[in-house]
Amino acid sequence: MSVPTDCVRSGLEYIAAKVDHGGQVYVIDIGRDVIHSAPLILTTWDDSTAVETGSFAHAVFGPKHMAKSYTPDENVRVTYDHGAEPPGETDLGEWSSVRLADVGREYREYYRENSGDFYTPVENPVETVTTVLDER
């Protein structure tokens, strides 16, 4: 199952705005949620990037944008996992002054095994993000 690069691009724009265009965001995984089949970007960051009081899942186009009816592919969801502590990182590049890092395969597989079945992951999330960064 794939996620269109336009969706990833929209999700990265949302993330950059959420963290006020600074700091480092860790990409945990990319996939589709099992309820809506909507694209999903799973992330985390530390308090030095942006202070959050808990985990969240936000649709990029929320209720205030609902004058238009969005298809699941048009409305990517972004999640933030509060308290996730990636053991390592690989720099992926920059998006709107935000450093993007990959959490690594071991952590990603651990996350997939322990987070329940709320999403179906893409085969290679790192490649998906680097493709979007390269297209920029």
Image (cartoon, rainbow, N blue to C red):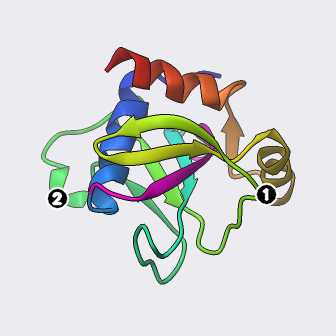
Q: Is residue 56 above or below residue 26?
A: below
Residue 55 percent across, percent down from the top left: 54, 72
Question: Could you say which is closer to the camera, residue 71 or residue 2?
Answer: 2
Pick whichever of labels 1 and 2 is earlier in the sequence. Answer: 2
Among all residues in the image, which is located at the extreme left? 67
Residue 108 percent across, percent down from the top left: 77, 46
Element marked by disc 1 = loop
Residue appearing at x 30%, y 43% in the figure? 13
Residue appearing at x 59%, y 73% in the figure? 82
What secondary structure prevails in the magenta region?
strand
Q: Is residue 24 above or below residue 72?
A: below
**Residue bearing the label numbered 2:** 64
Question: Could you say which is closer to the camera, residue 99 or residue 67?
Answer: 99
Q: CA distance from mark 1 to mark 2?
A: 30 Å
The image quadrant of residue 75 is top left
Residue 9 percent across, percent down from the top left: 36, 32
Q: Is residue 48 left or right of residue 88?
A: left
Among all residues in the image, which is located at the extreme bottom? 53
The range drawn in magenta is 21-35
Question: Could you say which is closer to the camera, residue 50 or residue 111?
Answer: 50
The image quadrant of residue 83 is bottom right
Which numbered tag is attached to residue 116? 1
Q: At label 2, which amino acid type do we have? A: Lys
Q: Is residue 28 magenta?
A: yes
Element marked by disc 2 = helix
